[in-house]
Each structure stands twice: as C-alpha cells, then as structure tokens.
Image: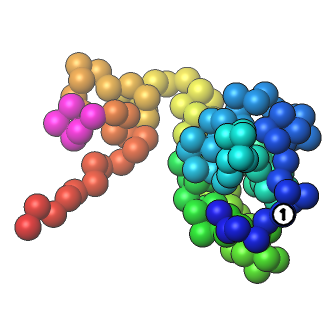
Amino acid sequence: MSEHLSSHDLLPIGQVAARAGVPVSTIRYYETLGLIPAVRSSANARMFPRHVLRRIALIQVSVRYGIPLAEVAEMLSDLPDDRPPSRAEWGTISTTWGEHLKRQQAVLERMQAELTGCIGCGCLSQSRCAVLNSDDRLRTDGSGPRRVLGPPATTDTD
C-alpha cells in the first residue's frame, strides 16, 4: 500500500462494514482473500482506503450473479491498491465481467433446452435422454453426466 494515503483517505473496519452493509467478518474475509487492501494504523488497527467501498460493491454484485470469489479476485488483481481505479481500469473489469455473464447465459440456455426437451417429451428414452444412464453404460466415457457435459477433455502428457 502506498505511503501517500492520508488518514482522511483511510476508514476503520467498522465504518467500512457499515457503509458497505456487510458484517465486519466479511471485510476481514475479503482482506484475507486479497480482494481488498488494508493498512495497519500505529495502534495496529485495520484501516482501509475509501475506494475499497467500490470494490466491495463489485464483489457483492458479482457474487449475487454467480461469479465465484476466485474469479472476482482474478478480476481485481490488476487494480491498484493505493488509489481508486481509473475509468479505463473499471472498463476492463466490466468487459471481463460481461464475458463471464455471456458464458453463464449460454450454459443456462443450454440447460433450459435440455431440461425442457427431457421433461417435455416424457419418453425418458435410454438412447437419447440426457439424464438417464441405464446400467451405468457411459462410465467408460468418464465421470459426471456425460450426455450433458459431452466427451471428457483430453490432456496431452507429452
């Protein structure tokens, strides 16, 4: 964390939690994961730059829409700790987030189509149903719901 942050730019953990609308434990957890930066006061209290409030808002929205904290951490990793992000830096986050949401939307649309077809047809066909796997016939194709997931990814061991 940069030394050019003034005490006016820093907020105690309780104030950050109150302004963000989350428990203090959540703020500590986000700090532990590296999602938000903190500095220690001379009395060893956690202090946070004001701009972490925007990060916390992004974290909360991301989690609400199903983006795992690991992906949120990856998105935030390029942001500066010692100053608020620039418009361009937030734009990069927005683009990354938009791409993730598009992928999620495609997965949900495929899932809806598969479930609608299965529930709608009522046949529960052993040969084409994406759900049934009588006698575990697909075990040789790999683990998990093979008809839904498709063939397992191959890895090169060379």
User: Residue 52 placed where, x, y %?
Assistant: 78, 54
Q: Quadrant of the N terminus?
A: bottom right
Q: Nearer the viewer, residue 109 or 105?
A: 105
Q: Nearer the viewer, residue 80 or 92?
A: 80
41 vs 74, left or right, is: right
Q: Is residue 80 visible?
A: yes
148 vs 78, left or right, is: left
The kind of residue tagged 1 is Ser
Q: Quadrant of the C terminus?
A: bottom left
Residue 98 lies, with reference to residue 72, above or below; the image says below
Q: Residue at x 62, y 30 (%)?
A: 120
Give the residue at mark 1.
Answer: 6
Q: Residues within 10 Å of mark 1 (few under 14, many from 20)?
A: few
Q: Is residue 102 visible?
A: no
User: Residue 22 placed where, x, y %?
Assistant: 81, 32
- Farthest residue toward the left? 158
Query: Helix or strand or loop: what does disc 1 sit on?
Result: loop
Give the residues in magenta: 139-143
Q: Nearer the viewer, residue 103 or 91?
A: 91
Residue 90 lies, with reference to residue 66, above or below; the image says below
Q: Residue at x 76, y 30 (%)?
A: 24
50 vs 2, left or right, is: right
Residue 117 lies, with reference to residue 57, above or below; the image says above
Q: Residue at x 63, y 44 (%)?
A: 31
Q: Residue at x 70, y 33 (%)?
A: 26
User: Residue 37 placed where, x, y %?
Assistant: 66, 54
Which colouring convention does the figure follow? Answer: rainbow
Instruction: Please identify the dominant SS of the magenta region.
Output: helix
User: Residue 117 placed where, x, y %?
Assistant: 58, 37
User: Is 126 colored magenta in this rendering?
Assistant: no
